[in-house]
Image: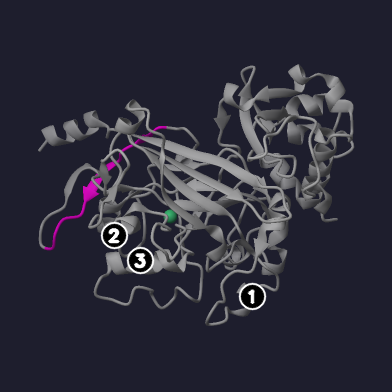
Amino acid sequence: MSGAETTDPQLESWIAVAADSDFPIQNLPYGVFERRGTARIGVAIGTQILDLFESAEAGFFDDVCERELLQAPVLNPLLAAGRSTWLLLRKRISALLRAGGDGRLREGGAERFFCRQDAVAMRVPMEVGDYVDFYSSIEHATNLGKLFRPNAEPLLPNWRWLPVGYHGRSSTIVVDGTAIRRPSGQRNAPADAAPSFGASRRLDIELEVGFVTGPGNGLGEPIAIGDTREHIFGLLLVNDWSARDIQAWEYQPLGPFLGKSFATTISPWIVTLEALEPFRSQGPTQEPSPLPYLRVDEPWAYAISLAIDLQTRQMEERGIAPETISQTTFAGMYWNVAQQLAHATANGAVTRPGDLFASGTISGSGPGSQGSLIELTWNGERPITLTDGESRRFLEDGDEVTLRGWCERSGTRRIGFGCARGRIEPAYAVAAASIQERK
Ligand code: CA
């Protein structure tokens, strides 16, 4: 059972969908939105959301799954149900929204089953038990190696053998639009000088794509690489906000800690692997050949176009549109999602429904294709000049960052991820002041 008919480019919905919409009937991503005081699971279609709580209440899915899976305030029960349920559900939703398909939804009344995306608040769609962030772009790892360890080989010896990663902080994962408070912490200083405590001066973006897990594994039972597809529900955009001055001081020898744990923004819609199937592609050649437990025999890269837009407060006040400061693609990632999940569970560690695994910063090799400011401005040495004349080394208070992602290929219908936005707010002054006073 493949569900390939749900991505047929000829399909049209009876709901109006603009040609450049991220959410045609071929996409059908899942999210959680607020309606009538409750959190509900929904599916994006055009500018609308199909309310799965109401649709389940009407009995449209009674032969697909228990209503409880679709009437929960988070996606976790549906994620736990597994791929066969996901496929049946996707086929039914596609049929209900299709022009000339199952007419029950259309006849049931738009008021009850739909609401406008711009009229509701979105939530983090799943309860994230564990969050892992990888480091899987060879261009990014090479650039950061050069910047953080200028006198050494940029790629450490393990990098081509395993997908390097660290455990992040799931409780500070926030959804698109959440304000990002500039973190304070110990900032690095020139050699032989003491660090200082205060607001980060080098706040940065990390453009990433994450995947959300389904059923997961039991303790001590690794997920074989050939089985990873059963455990990956879909992909979304991730901004792993990073305070470079805090990170550079704290990261050795145990890796990132407070320089990244203050906030991680995700896009609200999870695009399923079924919707992404037409956009699978061969990843880069891996040399040396991975160890057997990391070998794949099918294409596991995804041709997802990505962009970072920046709008400063001054640009906003002058009515200047956000400016694209980076464009890249997910297709060139060295380590793929199947390898990441197989590696993360190879020691028997547990993955549960709703866990988030992010790719690591996605950077290309050409100019303007890097997924972080530290790379785009080469550690601040080459500031970016914006159209209104301002320049940026790192993020300033009032800056709004928007990540966007979409897939386009001839013979397919374009689909998109929506966006992951965050505006920088000033550091928490009271906490810093009270610490200063005690000196
Ligand atoms: Ca990261």
Task: Say which of 424 and 375 sits in front.
Answer: 375
Is mark 1 in CB contact (under 8 Å) with mark 3? no
- Residue flagged by tag 2: what amino acid is it? Trp
View quadrant of ligand 1: bottom left
Q: Earlier in the sequence, mark 1 or mark 3?
A: 3
Asked if the beta carbon under badge 3 is closer than 8 A to the nearest atom of ligand 1, the reply is no
Q: Nearer the viewer, mark 2 or mark 3?
A: 2
Other-residue count near label 2 (Cα within 10 Å), few / some / many at <14 / 14–19 / ≥20: some
Colour scheme shown:
one colour
Q: Nearer the viewer, mark 1 or mark 2?
A: 2
Say whether residue 96 is left or right of residue 342: right
Name the residue beneath numbered marker 3. Answer: 143
Give the extent of the magenta segment. 179-191
Q: Secondary structure at mark 2?
A: loop
Name the residue beneath numbered marker 1. Answer: 295
Q: Position of residue 84 (x, y in %)?
A: 81, 50
Name the residue beneath numbered marker 2. Answer: 378
Other-residue count near label 3 (Cα within 10 Å), few / some / many at <14 / 14–19 / ≥20: many
- Residue flagged by tag 3: what amino acid is it? Asn
Q: Earlier in the sequence, mark 1 or mark 2?
A: 1
Residue pictured at 29% horizontal, 53% vertical: 244
Q: Residue furthest bottom?
A: 288
Residue pictured at 60% horizontal, 57% vertical: 350
Can you say which quadrant of the picture contains the N terminus? bottom right
Task: Say which of 345 and 65 sits in front.
Answer: 65
Can you say which quadrant of the picture contains the C terminus? top left
Q: Is residue 348 visible?
A: no
Residue pictured at 47% horizontal, 33% vertical: 177
Q: CA distance from mark 2 to mark 3?
A: 9 Å
